[in-house]
Image: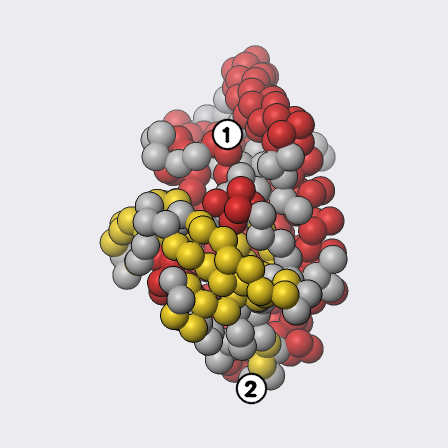
Amino acid sequence: GSFQSKPLHARFLTVLAGPVASVLFGFILFVVIGVTAGIPSLDDPTPQVRMVMPDSPAQAAGLRTGDILRAINGEPVKTTEQAGEIIRANANKPLRLTMERDGETFTITITPREVDAEIDGQTRKIGQIGVMWHVMRKKEPFPKVLAHAGLMTVGMSFAIVDGLRRLIFGQGNIHEVGSVISIASATNATAKLGLVEVADFAAKFSVMLGIINLLPIPVLDGGYLLIFTLEALRRRKLSPEAMARVQMAGFVIVLMIFLAVFSLDIYKLITGKLIR
């Protein structure tokens, strides 16, 4: 029979299977990366720029992938952890960065942008310059790989939900959201970093897709799950007319979000603020 004629619990589980499979695929990919390439190690080597984020202080200052950080305000910097601590502690304060590119040393001034970040369950203001540092990977026992994959999946899920919550309540930045153009640009930038980074990006993207699909917006799986929950509470199905109206409303919401984000990406493309 048709999908609508199936029992409520069967329809609920069928729809839920899609987002769950997407998140699970991301988790499995994190495990595969961990087993084959290792998991990120905290014993990071000299801080080297892996990626410069769009519309960031680092991009404005002219930092590029491959640049090596040697000192901040004249003080030598040995690890990415040390670099991160200094940058986080200096929001809105100019920092003098001594960088090395192709064997030549140069100095630039960057002012870390102040952002809200969840640290130990509390929202704190920290500084960010908009770079991802090169990560060293280390082979670890399988239980540790599993734990890391689990933490990555759960951590990303919470980060996405929190990001969407902040966006809805006006605390986030719509510029951080990307459309197909941003994703293609990020994929292209990631591809230059190698197969492991592409797989890592795919794992994160899969988790993100699964979580976003659970949003309670009609036409997304989360919207259908909300409708099924309402049907269970009302003990009767929505009429086909009501279902059509709800789906149309959901379609309009998704279309508006898509157009807003797509327009922003066109602007970023014209102004050169996409990920490089």
- Front residue of 103/93: it is 103
The residue depicted at 43 percent of the width and 34 percent of the height is: 173
Residue type, label 2: Pro
Residue 172 drawn at (x, y percent): 39, 36
Q: Are marks 2 and 1 in contact (CB under 8 Å)?
A: no
Residue depicted at x 46% and y 76%: 78
In the rendered image, is residue 40 in sight? no
Label 1 residue SS:
loop
Residue situated in front as seen by the camera: 168 or 228 = 168
Q: Which residue is mark 1?
A: 217
The span from disc 2 to disc 1 (Cα, nearest Å) is: 41 Å
Q: Secondary structure at mark 2?
A: loop
Circle 2 sits on which residue? 141
Q: Residue at x 38, y 70 (%)?
A: 75
Q: Quadrant of residue 31?
A: bottom right
Q: Residue at x 68, y 35 (%)?
A: 181
